[in-house]
Amino acid sequence: MNSSSQWIEIQGDGGVFGAYLALPRNPAASGGAPGIVLLQEIFGVNEHIRGVAEQYAADGYVVLAPDLFWRQGARIELGYGEADWQRAVQLKQASSVAQAQADIRAAAQALRALPGVGARIASLGFCYGGLLSYHAAANGDVDAAVAYYGGGIQNALERAGDIHVPLMMHFGARDSHIPLDAVKKIAERFDDRDNVEVHVYTEAEHGFNCGHRASYRQQPAALAHGHTLVFLSETI
């Protein structure tokens, strides 16, 4: 990848936590590079998430992926086997969405303060991180937001009125975790919003963007990445 990366520390609510920072190798143009707060699945800032960070850094963004499970253990990194799935669910159950939102706010502030970062940043999240990206938009912590297969967004639509920044959501039509009825409910809630896009990929399951999963699908992953790059280029 055409980027450089390192772990940094962020002062959060109740302690210091780590975040994986990926930088573009090429210097930013005048005004600085746009930033992305990258929000993990329930498997931690693992190889997949670090790879996504480096991918978007190669696309010209400064990317910061906070370790949102730091209260349960620093830099927990899981794969996608059965034992890791069970551990990931335990971590999610032991975590707090409210605390995660506070951590994301701290990460967004830290990202904005980094040298070479421009005035505008976005959040980009997958699965659990997709839901958190939605909340980051509602909280006004970012200037745009992207959510991949964000589980639970359909249960947080009371926050739709709080979202005033551009929002893009990606879903798979064959997602066994997020039924199409839920996706339809989300799309209908934002139907009158010109700054909200909902993309549904016909052959995609949950986790279709992750090459480490059996559910990975190259075509929808490529399409979603392209949609996201265009969206980010237009919003931040």
Image: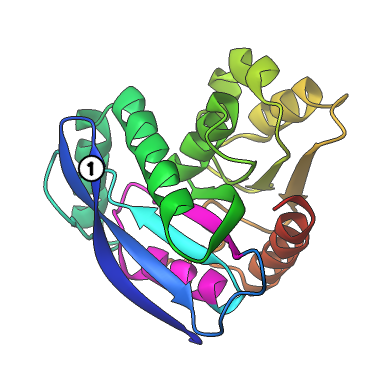
Q: Residue furthest left?
A: 73
In the picture, measured across the screen, residue 76 lies left or right of residue 165, that is left
Residue 48 seen in this snapshot: yes
Q: Is residue 124 left or right of residue 6?
A: right
Give the residue at x 54% y 19%: 155
What's drawn in magenta, residue-wise? 32-57
Residue 34 is a magenta residue: yes
Question: x, y percentage for residue 141?
Answer: 52, 34
Between 8 and 193, which is closer to the camera in this rendering?
8
Residue 196, quarter of the rendered image: top right
Residue at the image position 41 percent from the left and 35 percent from the top: 105
Identify the residue shown where x is 49% and y is 50%. Answer: 126
Compared with residue 198, is residue 83 higher up or lower down, i.e. above or below?
A: below
Q: Is residue 170 above or below residue 35?
A: above
Give the amino acid at mark 1.
Gln
Image-based side of 154 in relation to 201, left or right: left
Q: Nearer the viewer, residue 175 or 147?
A: 147
What's the residue at 57%, 40% (across, down)? 142
- Give x and y (percent) for residue 221: 64, 66
Q: Secondary structure at mark 1?
A: strand
Rendered image quadrant of residue 72: top left
Q: Which residue is mark 1?
A: 11
Residue 58: x and y, percent?
55, 79
